[in-house]
Amino acid sequence: MTTSATSGTGGPTENSLRRALRRARDGVSLDVSEAAVLLQARGEHLTDLSASAARVRDAGLEAAGRPGVITYSKSVFIPLTRLCRDTCHYCTFVTVPGKLRRAGHGMFMSPDEVLDIARKGAALGCKEALITLGDKPEDRWPEAREWLDAHGYDDTIAYVRAISIRILEETGLLPHLNPGVLTWTDFQRLKPVAPSMGMMLETT
């Protein structure tokens, strides 16, 4: 007979949570179902889980010869476009074409604007260019489609790729891309020019 890892209310049973916490405490590799159960940890259970995670982190740093050292990479922020096809009402980054026009901005930052920011970041010791933008704005906004067409790009991903190449070649900064939801083909187009990428999954 098998028992479910969740209670009737959709949450984990106390036994499954305690078992997963014990395995985390022992430093055992967790499977996907155990990790999912631990996402529900609250109160004392969360404190227990955090302590286990800290021990794993500290042991890894010790094994790497860097006890207590946490590194970071300085990056410069490049908001390539603030247009997006999605309507996530909590988002304070995204805007609409009319507001961009009234503020005297284009639908996308120009290559000169991007490279100016990237060069200043490199001069200040940054190592990465954090390229942020909305998700495929041309799917929603004709103005975005018109800008891309006028500048010779099939889509936003093509512009992101082209500008990443210029950042790499002309400033030495490493592009970190946040271009929204990507297809496998999109990943393959961007992989050669971006050491790292981020993806927002709230509406996916």
Image (cartoon, helix red, strand yellow):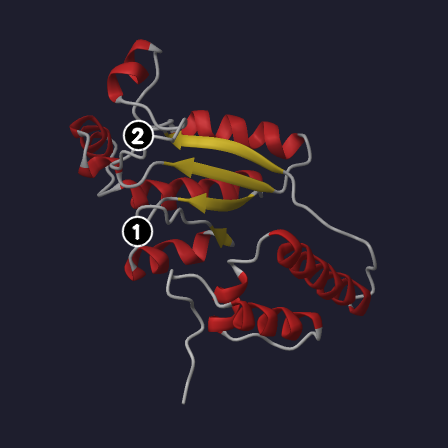
The answer to whether the residues at label 2 and label 1 have Cβ atoms under 8 Å apart is no
Residue 136 position, x and y percent, is 27, 41
Q: Nearer the viewer, residue 69 or 163?
A: 69
Q: Please state if 93 lies on the left or on the right of 129 as rendered.
A: left
Please, which residue is most extreme toward the left here?
A: 142
What SS does tag 1 mark? loop
Q: CA distance from mark 2 to mark 1?
A: 18 Å
Residue 167 position, x and y percent, is 49, 40
For the N terminus, which image quadrant?
bottom left
Q: Amino acid at mark 1?
A: Thr
Q: Nearer the viewer, residue 196 or 170?
A: 196
- The residue at the point 38 percent across, 60 percent down is 9
Q: Amino acid at mark 2?
A: Leu
Q: Nearer the viewer, residue 53 or 176?
A: 53
Q: In which image quadrant can residue 135 be found?
A: top left
Residue 140 position, x and y percent, is 18, 34
Q: Which residue is mark 2?
A: 83
Q: Is residue 163 above or below residue 42?
A: above
Q: Please state if 81 lies on the left or on the right of 198 as rendered.
A: left
Q: Which residue is mark 1?
A: 204
- The residue at the point 69 percent across, 74 percent down is 27
Q: In which image quadrant can residue 148 be found?
A: top left
